[in-house]
Amino acid sequence: MNFTLKALPLAISVAMLPISAQADEATDAKIAKLEQQVQSLQKQQTNSIADKFNFNGFINVAYISANNDAGYNNATTSADFNQDSKLGFQGTFNISNQTQAVMQLVTRGANDWDVEAEWAYISHRFDNGIQARAGRLRVPLFLYSDFLDVGYAQPFARPPVEVYESVPFSSYTGGDVSYDIEFDNSTLTLQGFGGESDVKDAERDVVLNNIMGANITWTDFTWTARAVYGQTSIDGEVYLNENPSTIQDRKSTFTGVSGSYDNGNFFATGEWTQVTIEGALADNESAYLTLGYRIGEFTPYVTAAYYETIDNDERANNPTYAFAFDRERTAYSAGLRWDFIDSVALKFDVTYLTDFNDTHGGLNGNIERALKGLEMHDSTAIYTVKIDAVF
């Protein structure tokens, strides 16, 4: 009997061994299953984040040169591969079906390849269709403002400088609100914008306060018509022959009208702008018209453009101001776009400038020649070969 009692614990232990082993196996199986579930959830989360993120970019590689050193688009008689070359990356994160975060980084050869944030904003589309954006945005003054740096989205080698450089900035920090009104076969878009910006270059170091404006665009995707008005207050310094002149609280306005027609083959695009600034600083007017025709992979085009200051009489008695600010020129361009592979276009362009009307034409090379006592060029020609691509 004593033997039986002593052996009983051992017998129970031996009997429990299979049960314990089975329990361990069941626990291991549960742990493995939990690990699989965790990995599955992590994969789903990763895939969900990836699905919400979109990435694209563009690149422009350009050769430019000129027949003299007048300085249009900073071109000289030497080959230049930096002035019109750019690289950009844009990321869009869909926070929800109605909310996005967008950033576009651009590096330009003309700016020593420094990286700049052209866009960095958050947007939300409300249930009533109104879209609001806040952050760093393109200032919506021109027909091609939204894709100003994306050469592939434009028919020409570069947007006409006479119009697109009539204001010295392209982005601002602030916000905008837009609303689309849908008709049977067309769309009317209303947009209001506001914020601030700054400009620091060889001609000025200024702050643009209280930027405010609105534009209206109608399109049926063949015809497009657009009108825009904006204003700002300018503070800072403007350099006259490298000597600073202080300006304070100068109101400036921008008015623009543009339109386009595109039936798939023939297209016509034009813009007219007027900029006014209080005081002796120059008011200007500019416009261009581009005509083109798509023939398979090839798109030949021609452009005529002009730029002129329209308040020269206000500086007639001040030779220093008159020399610095009075300017006039006409530009004629002929070019060819060749879409030789998907998402890549090769462009050739020749632009001829004339009609400076006894001014330097707003060309840096002419200004430098005049300051050195040399005769200014009364015309110049610029040659461009460019590859534009998106990815």
Image (cartoon, rainbow, N blue to C red):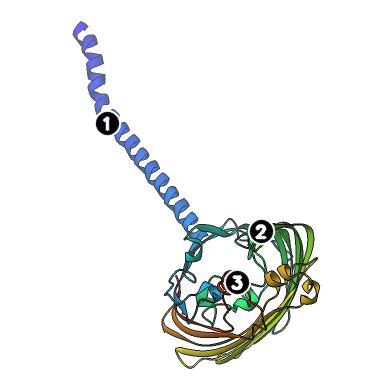
Residue 273 falls in which quadrant of the image?
Answer: bottom right
- Mark 3 vs mark 2: which is more N-terminal? 2
| Image location of residue 115, percent across then percent down | 50, 57
Give above or below for 329 relative to 56: below
Q: Do the residues labelled 2 and 1 touch (CB within 8 Å)?
A: no
Spatial CA span between label 1 and label 3: 93 Å
Contact (Cβ within 8 Å) of mark 3 with mark 2: no
Mark 1 or 3: in front is: 3
Q: Which of marks 2 and 1 is in front?
A: 2
Pointer 3 residue: 367
Alpha carbon separation for disc pair 3 and 2: 14 Å
Crowd rating for badge 3 (residues with CA inside 10 Å; few <14, some 14–19, many 20+): many
The percent position of residue 255, horizontal first and vertical second, equals 76, 74
Which amino acid type is marked by label 2? Answer: Asn
Furthest-left residue in view? Answer: 3
Disc marking residue 21: 1
Residue 224 visible? The answer is yes
Depth order, front residue of 342/355: 355
Image vertical order of residue 15 relative to residue 185, above or below: above
- The answer to whether residue 179 is seen in the rendering is no
Callout 1: SS: helix
- As helix, strand or loop, the secondary structure at mark 3 comes to helix
The residue beneath circle 2 is 243
Report helix, strand or loop for mark 2.
strand
C-beta proximity under 8 Å, tags 1 and 3: no
User: Looking at the picture, how far across and down is residue 49, in whole percent?
Assistant: 49, 54
